[in-house]
Amino acid sequence: MAISQFNLNDKQRAERKLLITVAEWKETEGTTTSTVREILGTRTEDSSIEYNADIETTTDIRGINYTDVNRTQPQQDFDPYLILGGSKLGAFLNDKRRRNAVSELNDFTVYVITAFVGETGAYEAECHTGCTITYTAIGGDSNVNMPISVYLSNDYNGSGAPKTGTVDKLSDDFVFTPDQAS
Amino acid sequence: MDKNQAIIDYLIQCPYIQNSPLYFNLVNARNDDVQIITSSEDVTTRTPYIDGSIPKKYTFTLITFKSITDMAVVKDSQHVNENVDDLADVQSLLDWIHEQEDAHNYPDFGDDCYIDDIQTTTDEPQFDGINDELTPPLAMYSISIIVNYIDTHKVLWKEN
């Protein structure tokens, strides 16, 4: 598959808002289960996906280095993650926190949307299933902050790699279309 | 949404201002007049959030004038000194802002903005001096006010 080029003008920088992380999970109320999504990073000034690559370098007797990347363990922290009225994920995580239901924190689907690649109606994205989102603290000074960490699975339904594809729009009700195998 | 008009519409709910002539960016020293004097924000210190929203401040000062007396304060609890009484009157304007903050009653900056809070920079009106060349001589008081809000009009993501 051809590598997609950036949808930016020559030398134009990509604004941070074009890299979007969206959490998706299921909520059950009574007998009804619904899928809920929320963009992460509201009122967060700085957040990056850290890949935490496990790198092993060996040097042969000629002095040449050979470097292997054994694995990556991508993680994204959001601090502050303020308790905000209307925050669906905040309420969901707070419910887990007060019940110490840590075993219920590992069934998120996380989309990483790169809106600087693709075009309107088809922005490139990747989908990770079975991700974990944890709260790391709660408190703060003037306002209640509950920083969270997102651990990406690098997996899509047991395939061993995230699923690449596109999303049709930049809103909660986007449709993710997986790439076709070439 | 014109934020200046939103501030005017907001302030005219205040009983003190309802009973006083209100002016916008005009220093006109007359007894009981209230002036809204706008300020500008230094945008170089702004840090946008990663979703594209931007924290902003709308800053303004309310200036009001009160006639003064040169009568000494009488050490009699039944007697009210005009200068002391006037300061309490101006204090009611500042207190009204605090009451609105407690009630989360904010100016309407439109759908693309939401207000975090409205604050006064002091708990008492600032006494800025006396102009004794006027008849009657007037004392000038000022209250600086900051509206902290989030401007979301550059956010790409739409929530349903």
Image: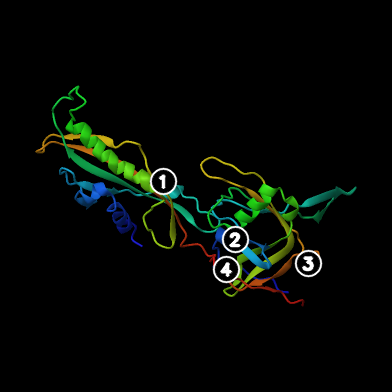
Other-residue count near label 4 (Cα within 10 Å), few / some / many at <14 / 14–19 / ≥20: many
Determine whether, in the image, residue B135 is placed left or right of residue A110: left
* Disc on the earlier residue, 2 or 4: 2
Above/below status of B136 relative to A38: above
Amino acid type, callout 4: Leu
Other-residue count near label 1 (Cα within 10 Å), few / some / many at <14 / 14–19 / ≥20: few
Q: Which residue lies under the disc numbered 1?
A: B102
Tell me where residue A178 appears, x and y as whole percent: 71, 73
Above/below status of A179 relative to A51: below
| Same chain check for tags 3 and 4 | yes
Tell me where residue B87 appears, x and y as whole percent: 24, 35
The numbered disc on residue A157 is 3
Q: Which residue lies under the disc numbered 4?
A: A170
Determine whether, in the image, residue B145 is placed left or right of residue B73: right
Residue A37 picture quarter: bottom right
Disc 2 to disc 4, C-alpha distance = 10 Å
Disc 3 to disc 4, C-alpha distance = 24 Å
Task: Say which chain tag 1 marks.
Answer: B
The numbered disc on residue A39 is 2
Determine whether, in the image, residue B70 is placed left or right of residue B117: left
